Image (tube, helix red, strand yellow):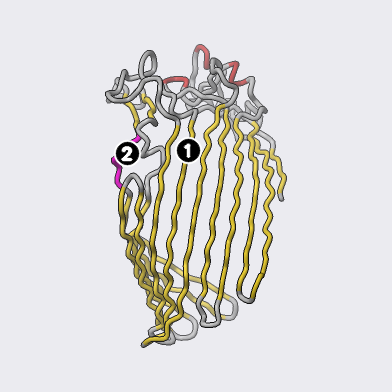
Amino acid sequence: GNLDKTQADAWDINQGHQSARAGTYVTTLPAGREGVINKDINGVVRWDFAPLQSLELEAGYSRQGNLYAGDTQNTNSDSYTRSKYGDETNRLYRQNYALTWNGGWDNGVTTSNWVQYEHTRNSRIPEGLAGGTEGKFNEKATQDFVDIDLDDVMLHSEVNLPIDFLVNQTLTLGTEWNQQRMKDLSSNTQALTGANTGGAIDGVSATDRSPYSKAEIFSLFAENNMELTDSTIVTPGLRFDHHSIVGNNWSPALNISQGLGDDFTLKMGIARAYKAPSLYQTNPNYILYSKGQGCYASAGGCYLQGNDDLKAETSINKEIGLEFKRDGWLAGVTWFR
């Protein structure tokens, strides 16, 4: 477990470095660092119920709260904002549970299977979503705090198979399933009519947008670690991901490790990387309004809206590195693109 606390910087720590302000915001100052209060506890119980067989049960809880130091998104505090100095204005709660079964057999086969559940709650004072009040505490909000709840479930299973055919090999086969569910009572409340809006959006409700969103990813993967010689290891891999919103993706990879004498190892790799969009990015009910005043070229505003027709991000990653190891000393240099 852990318990720690840091103090917030003084509200006027940056006095004398502020830009010129007038009217309501004349006393606004750039904020210093917030204080933090952390509390967490974690535990693991392990049971070796048979030779090479074990079960592990893990559980944890954490709570992180801030001590407000005066920060606002646009450095636009007022008397209400300043009254919150030193108060806890956002709280992050996290609970996690996991059950893992690791197994080994006399023929060299090993398996690893686990299920994990994590719940995160982001609880914070309501803030403005657009215009000059964006990111500033909303004094007129009907709730003292609003919550964003995220549930994350992961199932994982893999088997490692030693193969003695032509060369020594270890084949890894596995599968994963991940589900994320979110209830956001804060970020999905941007109005579509009235001040600080861009007007109605066709096909989108102005007042009754669902706070719920979810996505699932099912994956299959394979990797074969082949010892071609005592100093040469080649590892091809392939991963398939099916995302419930953005569809399918294949990610091949190839890694090579070549020993160069007793002290040096040359390592090379190329892979197709994959990144699925977040729940916000694929949720059409997630809407923010920008008033367009960030540059002189535009005096109008626009909406930033989630899109359920997005494609996953992909890239081709390449790297080559040289590692030196001798008598406990380890050094290396790597080029990555």
Q: Amino acid at mark 2?
A: Asp
Residue 310 among magenta residues: yes
Q: Which residues are magenta?
A: 306-311
The residue under the point 37% across, 25% down is 289
Counting from the top left corner in percent of width and height, residue 90 is at 60, 32
Mark 1 near mark 2, Cβ–Cβ under 8 Å?
no
Identify the residue under disc 1: 182
Q: Is residue 107 above or below residue 236?
A: below
Counting from the top left corner in percent of width and height, residue 313 is at 33, 50
Which secondary structure dominates the residues rendered in magenta? Answer: loop
What is the crowding at mark 1: few (fewer than 14 residues within 10 Å), some, or many (at least 20)? many
Counting from the top left corner in percent of width and height, residue 330 is at 54, 73
* Quadrant for the C terminus in the image: bottom left
Marks 1 and 2, how far apart at CA: 15 Å
First in residue order: circle 1 vs circle 2: 1
Q: How many marks?
A: 2
The residue under the point 66% across, 70% down is 49
**Quarter of the figure with residue 80:** top right
Residue 19 among magenta residues: no
Q: Which mark is residue 240?
A: none
Q: Amino acid at mark 1?
A: Met
Secondary-structure class at tag 2: loop
Secondary-structure class at tag 1: strand
Identify the residue under disc 2: 308
Query: What residue occupies the far front of the structure in this picture?
Result: 49
The residue under the point 67% across, 58% down is 44
